[in-house]
Image (tube, rainbow, N blue to C red):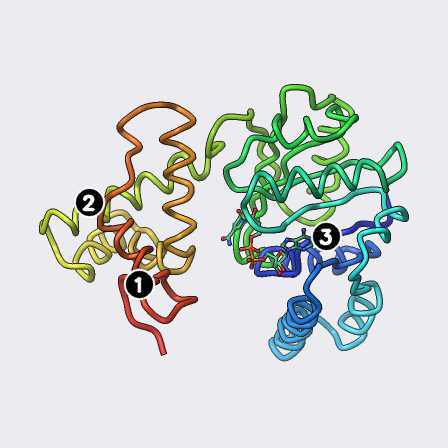
Amino acid sequence: MNTIMVIGAGQMGSGIAQVFAQSGYHVYLNDMNESALEKGMKNIEKLLNRAVDKGRMTEDEKTATIRRLSPSINLQDAKNCDLVVEAVIENMDVKMSVFKHLDEITPAHTILASNTSSLRITEIASATNRPDQVIGMHFMNPVPVMKLVEIIRGLQTSEETYQAIEDITRKLAKTPVEVNDFPGFVSNRILVPMINEAIYTLYEGVATVEDIDRVMKLGMNHPMGPLQLADFIGLDTCLYIMEVLHEGFGDSKYRPCPLLRNYVKAGWLGKKSGRGFYQYD
Ligand code: NAD
């Protein structure tokens, strides 16, 4: 595998493109929105400059990494790729449409991976005629820093596809963990209900925002409290994942907290909107 396309130059896609390029792969970073693409490329350059300043990378390595990255506005560039990693918005219709097009554009050997945080790989794969070559490759945020990649086997994912993705994950100096295709996989099935419970704890007046976070940081040794983490992930994303769990399992234990719904309705989405459980400049 030499040439990769990452689709979606947002928070996750730009990080994924960066780690592939740093590991020697030729990468097309694709976005349908030109200004998002420009922003994604600039973000990568900023992070690479920071790595040079901190002595974690030489100037030459930075230049070589940037040279391996090609911005792409045209999905047809996927015809040159051995692997495509999709990181567009978390919406099943949008992802299915992207996979349908990729199935038509890419060569028969190309593996199609999704970075979805909660949607079923099996359903995404059904938009293609190669469900055995469709797989979940769930990177964590921020991608250049976090070691884990959850690899999700869809119902029809072949052993060969799984092995290829496990190998490539190790080449990125990340740790693969194999999981099956159930709502929220492992990471978000455990993390997001914990965040939702922290919001219920606030909603019921058990403690303040700061004190809830303090208990989990000092008492459980979490690097960040659950409410601050929710602000970083985005409250809309947290709500969306709770809804996927609630619907996917049909179990009332996953019901989203009404306070979370209120915040999202108010446009308090966390750090990205300037206000969530905390205020940001
Ligand atoms: P984002 O909103 O920052 O970026 C999404 C990008 O996709 C945008 O630039 C948008 O222009 C582009 N896009 C949308 N439709 C497109 C299309 N049809 N073709 C090409 N580009 C398109 O989102 P994000 O936070 O980077 O999340 C991307 C994916 O990664 C989602 O599936 C999300 O669930 C998953 N994810 C997110 C996180 C996180 O912490 N943010 C963590 C793990 C996985």
Classify 10 Å Cα crowding around label 1: few (below 14), some (14-19), many (20 and above).
many
Above or below, 88 relative to 39: above
Q: Secondary structure at mark 2?
A: helix
Residue 35: percent from the left, percent from the top?
66, 71
**Foreground residue, 160 or 249?**
249
Q: Amino acid at mark 3?
A: Val
* Label whose residue precedes the other's in the sequence (3 or 1): 3
Q: Quadrant of residue 214?
A: bottom left
Q: Which residue is mark 2?
A: 200
Above or below, 54 relative to 265: below
Above or below, 55 relative to 241: below
Q: Amino acid at mark 2?
A: Tyr
Relative to 105, is 219 on the left or the right? Answer: left
Q: Amino acid at mark 1?
A: Gly
Q: CA distance from mark 2 to mark 3?
A: 37 Å
Q: Which residue is mark 1?
A: 276
Q: Residue at x 30, y 41 (%)?
A: 194
Residue 128: percent from the left, percent from the top?
75, 30
